[in-house]
Image: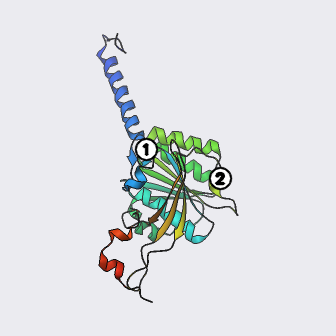
Amino acid sequence: MPAHPISADPRLDALRAELRAIESGQRSEASAVLPFGMDEVDCALASGGLACGALHEVAGASAGLADDAAATLFAAGIAARLAGPVLWALSRRDLFAPGLAQAGLGPDRLIYAECRKDDDVLAVLEDGVRHGSLVAVVAEISRATMTATRRLQLAAEDSGTMVLLLWRWRGAVDPLLVPTAAATRWRIACAPSQPLGIRGIGRPRWSVELVRQRGGPANHWLMEGTDEAGRLALPAEPQHRTAEARQAPIAA
């Protein structure tokens, strides 16, 4: 027996077909995944990358400015690798736009929303997710309830829009100790750069910790920071470098 009886009204059949197409499209968007492009990382993620229709959280490993900046660029790089407009909501006027541009997220793709407090940021964020025209929404917050994050997760699943919560430290309390509904949670810390064979500063390196993921274990990597397209990289092992590079003297 068919799931739906054959109707004598072609309009009803057309409506059923339209509803099935909409439901199929929503499932396709919600199941879309953004890979990091590094097998070692993507294979460790339960979805093979970051689920687009989901909530993800990022925080610096400390309240220090360097770790906070690294976490910001980590989130910006993720948003930059999605094609389309991005909403960035915040309550503090300390966002360095040229830094985001260097991570691949230029001003032509960004919509800024300056809010007075965290509750306003979360409200704007949810409206942005439910609008359906954005590829990602980013919010800088220092406080959010389980109920608020659950609403964001459900909204992300419905729209297929990625939600990135960028946690700011409040005092000495690690923001990732607070339970939320996020699909993944990331802690970012600065690490020493690779010494160069000439005078100069090497590509930034970060200690990237996957604190929690739904359906998989935690993990940790040493990564090179975002490039101009928002991409990360795993440092090349010495055996994969040329003999000339291995033997190059380090300038004092």
Quarter of the image with the C terminus is bottom left
Callout 1, which amino acid? Ser
Q: Position of residue 156 (x, y in %)?
A: 48, 43
Which residue is label 2 attached to? 177
**168, 17: nearer the viewer:** 168
- Residue at the far bottom in the pictured view: 252
Q: Secondary structure at mark 2?
A: helix
Q: Is residue 234 left or right of residue 55?
A: left
Q: Is residue 45 above or below residue 141?
A: above
Q: Residue 228 is drawn in which quadrant?
A: bottom left
Can residue 101 be seen here? The reply is yes
Q: Secondary structure at mark 1?
A: loop
Identify the residue at horizontal 56%, vertical 71% (top origin).
66
Q: Residue 61 is drawn in which quadrant?
A: bottom right
**224, 160: nearer the viewer:** 224
Among the two numbered marks 1 and 2 on one chain, the one whose residue lies closer to the N terminus:
1
Q: Is residue 136 left or right of residue 58?
A: left
Which residue is label 1 attached to? 47
Q: Residues within 10 Å of mark 1 (few under 14, many from 20)?
A: some
Gap between marks 1 and 2 measured at Cα:
23 Å
Callout 2, which amino acid? Leu
Q: Position of residue 243 (x, y in %)?
A: 30, 77
Q: Is residue 12 above or below residue 44?
A: above
Q: Is residue 12 left or right of residue 136?
A: left
Q: Is residue 155 left or right of residue 245?
A: right
Q: Position of residue 211 (x, y in %)?
A: 56, 53
